[in-house]
Image (cartoon, rainbow, N blue to C red):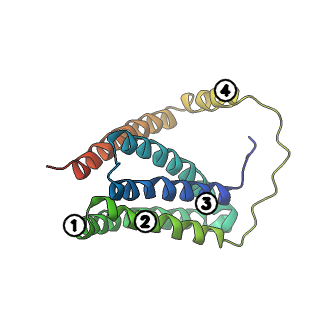
């Protein structure tokens, strides 16, 4: 399977897209033009950008650390994600109480910009990309699905993750509505 783009640039792009789209919310709120449609579009675009970022972030450590340290590195990355999710939720609640829901998103915008800067500072060169063979995306997706479907553990994990991601997407959308719709 051929890698199409630099993982670092994929992560930076995901961060910058997330920062940009989230920044539209406080701007629109300040102008009095924020709509439910905009919030839904922001949620979809930001979610897609997060998938783009996270897919690259998960696969980048093998090019940064020695093979013998991959398990330890992945454990630390997982622990950092858990700490960031917990601390981020509490910080987000505090900023929302202090600044209001729309302006509190500026903290999130800042975190994406900091992430992009930190990712840009990674000095390790990724392995050179081989010239990609011409393949159809549909065929590659089918090949990947066939591989996952052939392994019961991967199939179960995929279904659990897809269901959880869908439920969290719904929850986050409803949570945004709860925060932004006046009582």
Contact, mark 4 vs mark 1 (Cβ under 8 Å): no
In front: 5, or 21?
A: 21
**Which mark lies nearer to you, 3 or 1?**
1
Which type of secondary structure does the marked residue at label 3 adopt?
A: helix
Contact, mark 3 vs mark 2 (Cβ under 8 Å): no
The correct choice, above or below, for 65 with respect to 43 in the image is: below
Horizontal side of 160 relative to 69 (left or right) equals left
**What residue is shown with label 3?**
12
Horizontal side of 182 relative to 12 (left or right) equals left
**What residue is shown with label 1?**
97
Please report whichever mark, 3 or 4, sits nearer to the chain's N-terminal start.
Answer: 3
Q: CA distance from mark 1 to mark 2?
A: 27 Å
Q: Which mark is residue 138?
A: 4
Residue 165 x, y percent position in the rendering: 40, 42
- In the current view of this chain or complex, which residue is farthest to the right? 131
**Which mark lies nearer to you, 4 or 2?**
4
């Amino acid at each position: 399977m051929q890698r199409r783009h630099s993982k670092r640039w994929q992560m930076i792009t995901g961060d910058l897209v997330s920062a940009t789209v989230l920044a539209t919310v406080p701007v629109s709120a300040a102008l009095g033009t924020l709509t439910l449609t905009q919030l839904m579009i922001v949620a979809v675009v930001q979610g897609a950008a997060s998938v783009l970022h996270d897919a690259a972030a998960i696969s980048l450590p093998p090019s940064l650390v020695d093979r013998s340290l991959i398990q330890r590195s992945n454990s630390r990355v997982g622990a950092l994600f858990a700490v960031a999710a917990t601390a981020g939720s509490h910080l987000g609640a505090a900023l929302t109480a202090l600044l209001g829901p729309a302006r509190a998103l500026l903290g999130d915008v800042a975190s994406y910009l900091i992430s992009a800067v930190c990712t840009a500072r990674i000095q390790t060169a990724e392995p050179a990309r081989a010239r990609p063979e011409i393949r159809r995306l549909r065929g590659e997706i089918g090949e990947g699905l066939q591989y996952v479907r052939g392994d019961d553990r991967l199939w179960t994990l995929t279904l659990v993750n897809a269901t959880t991601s869908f439920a969290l997407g719904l929850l986050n959308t409803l949570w945004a509505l709860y925060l932004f719709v006046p009582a």
